[in-house]
Amino acid sequence: MPNGSDLIPGSVVGIIGFGAFGQLIAHHIRPHFRLYAYDPAPGLQPVAERHGVALTSLETAASCPVVVLATPVGCLDEIVDAIAPHIRPGSLVLDVGSVKLGPADIMKRGLPEHAEIVATHPLFGPQSARDGIASLKIAVCPIRGSRCYRLAAFLRHHLRLNVIMTTPGDHDRDAAIVQGLTHLIAKVLVQMQPLPKRMTTKSFDLLLEAVNMVRHDAPEVFEAIESLNPYSSGVRKKFFELASALNAELADGPV
């Protein structure tokens, strides 16, 4: 069973981006690794100390044996440009964004050949992971190098995650429906407030539970899911066409 030392020589991880998701990562991998993090946002020192993370420079975090890119998908290009000169030979670099085709291409083109690359997507967030991450799903896409399989084994055995090995294209095709429609429906329902709270059905309660899991996500998450996934526009078009057809059918009344 692989442990931190098997996965990473020296058991050191650098996290680029220490927002809500970077902090969630730190919380769950802290027992296995020594952690460094870089984030230009002010006021993160107390949070970092609480998670046992040393805040450091971009250069230091990027020179760790494993580098986790926990930044918005929209700024990944500039982040990869900034860290590329500091990536050491044999390092493992992975992202955790909601879209995989674009980020996989950015990392493959922008990172040095001596770096191994894995594109990942934890299929959960701080809200859905509030009771723990055991049995939750994570997509793992091998891009360059073979250490992705040791990473997958670590995620399974130590973090108890349900690992889905896939490709960036297959991931984005499914995510356009799974995440795209969920966030789209949530966005509409939130704008229909106030919603009933007392006289509800179980199915409506479950729908609201799903909405509440994503409604507080950063705006960049919605933007990535709906605008940066190449399959999302087609899914939206089909959804609204079907909804429009159903609305017209209902408006016509019974035949």
Image: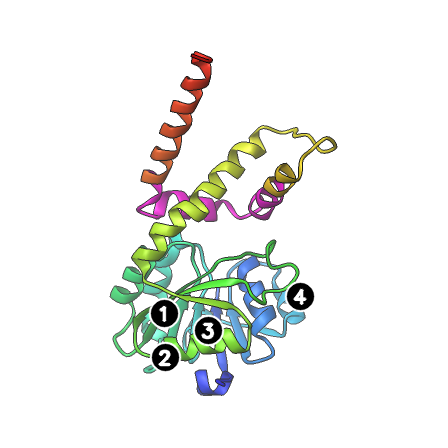
Q: Is residue 63 above or below residue 214?
A: below
Along the polypeptide, which appears first: circle 2 or circle 3? 3
The mark found on residue 46 in the picture is 4
Residue kind at label 3, given as amino acid type:
Ala
Q: Are marks 3 and 4 in contact (CB under 8 Å)?
A: no
The C terminus lies in which quarter of the figure? top left
Under circle 2, the secondary element is loop
Find the residue positioned furthest to the right. Answer: 198
Q: Determine which residue is flagged by label 1.
A: 118
Q: Nearer the viewer, mark 4 or mark 2?
A: 2
Do tag 2 and tag 3 residues touch (Cβ < 8 Å)?
no
Label 3 sits on a secondary structure element that is helix
Give the residue displayed 60% in from the left and 79% down from the top: 31
User: Residue at horizontal 43%, vertical 72%?
Assistant: 67
- Which residue occupies the extreme front position in the image? 255
Label 4 vs label 2: CA separation? 33 Å
Looking at the image, residue 115 sits to the left or right of residue 12; the answer is left
Residue position for label 3: 61
Task: Tell which tag, 3 or 1, sits nearer the viewer.
Answer: 1
Residue 53 lies, in percent from the top left, at 59, 73
Residues drawn in magenta: 208-233
Q: CA distance from mark 3 to mark 4?
A: 18 Å
**Disc 4 to disc 1, C-alpha distance:** 30 Å
Residue closest to the eye, 253 or 14? 253
Q: Which residue is mark 2?
A: 147
Instruction: Report whether residue 19 is seen.
Output: no
Residue at image x 32%, y 64%? Answer: 81
Q: Give the main secondary structure of the magenta stretch.
A: helix
CA separation in Å, label 2 and label 1: 8 Å
Q: Whole-percent x and y of residue 218?
A: 52, 48
Mark before the other along the chain sequence, 4 or 1:
4
